[in-house]
Image (spheres, grey):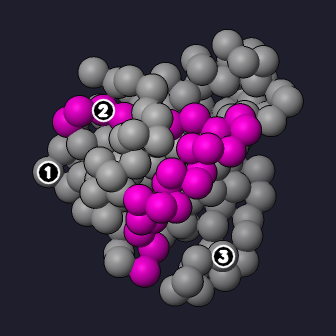
Amino acid sequence: MIILATRAHATSLAAIHAASFPPRDAWGTDAIQLQLALPGVFGLTDERGGMLIGRIAAEDAEVLTLAVVPAARRQGIAGRLLQKAKALAVSRGGSALFLEVATSNAAALALYRREGFVEVGRRRRYYADGSDALVMRATLL
């Protein structure tokens, strides 16, 4: 079940993030608490080991991070988190949802394309390892 995450969920969200990303890229509890305290930022969590943090500003929404622990992958959790984020963005006046993804992350790219995201830009050498990020957009209305 997916629920709205609050700052009280920061420790569990950080654990999911740490299990899903290399140590240099993982967000800690403090960083997640700070994010969730910002205006327009929302968190979602799935008890099976998934999390999403997003932000809504006017008509644009953005996925800041999305993670599913390795043992829970390929069960549709990430897709459901994205669908919930889309619905939340629409309910708050959003008309588009943006995200960035590494060009080398084939599984995430396939998921995002299935969820209606299209490439709208590229950020060269965006990630710490020097890889590029694709900027992707899904129309919500």
Between 131 and 89, the one lying in front of the other is 89
Residue at 24%, 52% (x, y): give it: 69
Residue 46 spot, x, y in % from top left: 30, 32
Between 140 and 19, the one lying in front of the other is 19
> Could you tell me which quadrant the C terminus lies in?
top right
Residue 80 spot, x, y in % from top left: 39, 27
Badge 1 amino acid: Ala
Residue at 38%, 24% (x, y): give it: 3
Q: Is residue 74 magenta?
A: no
As drawn, which residue projects farthest toward the front?
8
47 up-or-down from 73: above or below: above
Between 114 and 37, the one lying in front of the other is 37
Residue at 65%, 61% (x, y): give it: 134
Residue for badge 3: 126
Residue for badge 2: 46
Region of the chain picked out in magenta, as a range = 24-48
Residue 63 spot, x, y in % from top left: 60, 44
Separation of marks 3 and 2 at Cα, in angstroms:
28 Å
> Could you tell me which quadrant the N terminus lies in?
top left
